[in-house]
Image (cartoon, helix red, strand yellow):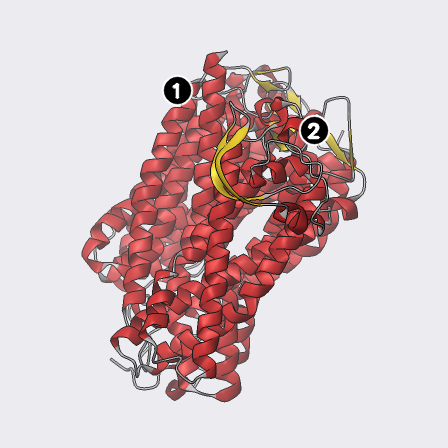
Amino acid sequence: MLHDADALSLARFQFAFTISFHFIFPAFSIGLASYLAVLESLWLRTGRALYLDLFKYWLKIFAVVFAMGVVSGIVMSYQIGTNWSVYSDKAGPVIGPLMAYEVLTAFFLEAGFLGVMLFGMNRVGRGLHFTATLAVAIGTFLSAFWILSANSWMQTPVGHTTNAAGQFVPVDWLAIVFNPSFPYRLVHTVFAAYLTTALAVGAVGAWHLLRERANEGARVMFSMAMGMITVVAPLQILAGDQHGLNTLEHQPVKVMAMEGHFKSYTDGAPLILFGWPDEAKAETLYAIEIPKASSLILKHSFDAPLKGLDSVDRKEWPPVAIVFWSFRVMVGLGMAMLGLAAFSLLARVMHRLYDWKLLHLLALVMGPAGFVAVIAGWVTTEVGRQPYTVHGLLRTVDSVSPLQAPAVATSLLAFIIVYFIVFGAGVFYILRLMSHPPQRGEEGPERDQPVRAAGLTPSPVVPESLTSPGGET
Amino acid sequence: MLTFDLPTIWAFIIAFAIFAYVVMDGFDLGIGILFSWIPVGRERDTAMNTIAPVWDGNETWLVLGGGGLLAAFPLAYGTILSALYAPIVAMLLALIFRGVAFEFRWRDPRHRPYWDIAFSLGSIVAALAQGITLGALLQGIAVENRAYAGGWFDWLTPFSILVGASLVCGYALLGSTWLIMKSEGTLQVRCYRMAFGLGIATIVAIGAVSAATPFLSDVYWQRWFAWPQVLFTAQVPLLVAIATVVFFASLQRRHHYTPFLMALLVFTLSLAGLGISLFPYVVPPSMTIWDAAAPDASLKFMLVGAVVIVPIILAYTGYSYWVFRGKTGHEGYH
């Protein structure tokens, strides 16, 4: 029996590891694809070569990010079967079609137009190229739509019944797709992707401003990124708050763990800022708390009663400390993003956006904050759902494949080694691309990766002076 | 005998996805398999360029195969993947190496030789693992109580290794004929030579796998040799023979397109043969498509999407291939 438990823990760790690694890339490429579409449309509308330079600068980075997202994503689509075969059998009839729609509507759209977007600038007209960029951007969004719908159904399952074999049988697809937590999770996650990208773009702009304040490309990307953060960071905090209230309604135990509330409170629950949740003792030690503030946030009333983990069986508890801390990491970074937004707004109002070194330093330091916050948020919601894969209906322990611990341990080790080598190299290449200052006549990916057809090829539709002003080396 | 209920329709759709995957990722995996035999520099760069814009789309069919299987035949998906754990994980890891190599080899000229090895080994291991998976599926998977009931190395047999090696050969054949179509000069000459040897190897491999399969189980034997079905099934080897003759003749005459088309035809026929052996089993010897099928509500919901979207996908995939049509060069635009 211990053996089985080991295999289960290893399978869980393997899933957590591979999905966390994977999630970093789409979180970046969802935002980056939209940013690229904005840059290309600005170029088409204004004719300013600078926008095309920036487009090509970020397109090279996008190509690397996207490739890593693709290969780490293929792992996810098979891992559900290798490690979670019982879950596949039972939840497949509901989850499977949602994921199939993701492949049909999103993955093919992205993959089909990616080649044209990366290498086709001189082969198709400008309008068609922009269409390809838009198609990729829309594809990334559709992908988020379906996969978050599937994930949300596992958090708030509705619209199904069960059959004799213990399978979830869909009854109402509209209810399944638009399940209660889905709209909140979608908005929260897509905003997160935009913020993550804006922070990364902002950090790159800041880095080059610190080295060369007059760099026009660095100025434009920094300004655009800070503008995006100024708009999205406050919206994200609102969206997160709404998402939290939705979770309180449907998955109250998760919120109890997030808040570190072991006890039930009859007249006003305190907001525990920091502390050490001790599951064995069933209390949060060394708690620093604001009286009644949790009730205010969650119930909009100082004296509203709030139930704690003592109101449910211990078998229903998620790992409290992980949820408690990952939630604080996410919220803390969210507040820091709000701070950066306010600071940059002040600089903008005072016409000092490109001058304040402290702002540039802060933006640089905050560069990876989005990625960390995204992972922390994901851990909060996924660990907070435990001990279930389908909330309240299918336990994680009953979802796993008939695996033996050595098999899972071996594959886990292989995944860890390969991911660190391959994605380590990828991150290094991305950072190296980012370290080059944006310049006039920026090369696109097709420069180093030439694709040319002889014979039948139509002559370039885009005038050369527009596609590569200056750079003819 | 063949009623077109929802599980049958979905079996055909997934068979189509697998077919699309095998022929499309087949040629780009094939180029990876042959990479060590293509000289560093101009020829390698050209070979890579012929597939750089399309490999990602090709691999998406693998995701559709997996996702579609989960959605339409969830029990089969869970059973097959947990039974064939080792080759599946090996395939996934190999695909990671070869997938990133497309970008990384251009980003890092100093370490390009390493990424070229990653590309080549990744392609070989992925192809081998896919073949072993297929071989292991053909020889049957032990199922009890809706779960895999065999051991961890059941997949490893001489037969599965044979199928694995055959697929490596076959993909390499697709790769070499694709390059004949897309390249000129020394690379093309080299590919004609490789395609000749690989053509022979592939035909021998197909012969060996076909000869061994009916002995795996009586069901396969009946499927192929029972009267009067044999009149129908015998068309498959007959057509393979015709395609083989045309293939070698077209190599002799230095045709550009025919070798690739004939290689595609041979693959199509092999997959048709596979379908004849397997249908209606999705996990032989015990699980049929009806045992494993998701409820009708799931199959119907997806069918609407598949019927509308798959033709659109095929159209824009075709467009993307059209944009990059003709011979591919190694140098830049200007």
Residue at x 41% of width, y 63% of height? A200
The percent coordinates of residue A294 (x first, y second) are 63, 46
The percent coordinates of residue A42 (x first, y second) are 50, 81
Query: Looking at this rendering, what residue extends furthest in the left direction?
Result: B110
Q: Which-is-in-front pick, marks 2 and 1?
A: 2
Give, as a three-letter code, the residue at label 1. Answer: Pro
Q: Of residues A26 and B287, which is closer to you in this image? A: A26
Give the left or right position of residue A249, taking residue B159 as reference: right
Which residue is denoted by mark 1 in the rendering?
A: A406
Q: Of residues A130 and A320, which is closer to you in this image? A: A320
Give the left or right position of residue A298, taking residue A259 as reference: right
Label 2 marks which chain's residue? Answer: A
Q: How far separated are the C-alphas under marks 2 and 1?
A: 29 Å
- Vertical arrangement, residue A367 with respect to residue B1, above or below: below
The percent coordinates of residue A57 (x first, y second) are 37, 71
The reply to whether residue B334 is in sight is yes
- Vertical arrangement, residue A255 with respect to residue A101, above or below: above
Residue A393 — which label?
A: 2
Label 1 marks which chain's residue? Answer: A
Task: Point out the tag, 2 or 1, that comes first from the N-terminus.
Answer: 2
Residue at x 44% of width, y 87% of height? A48
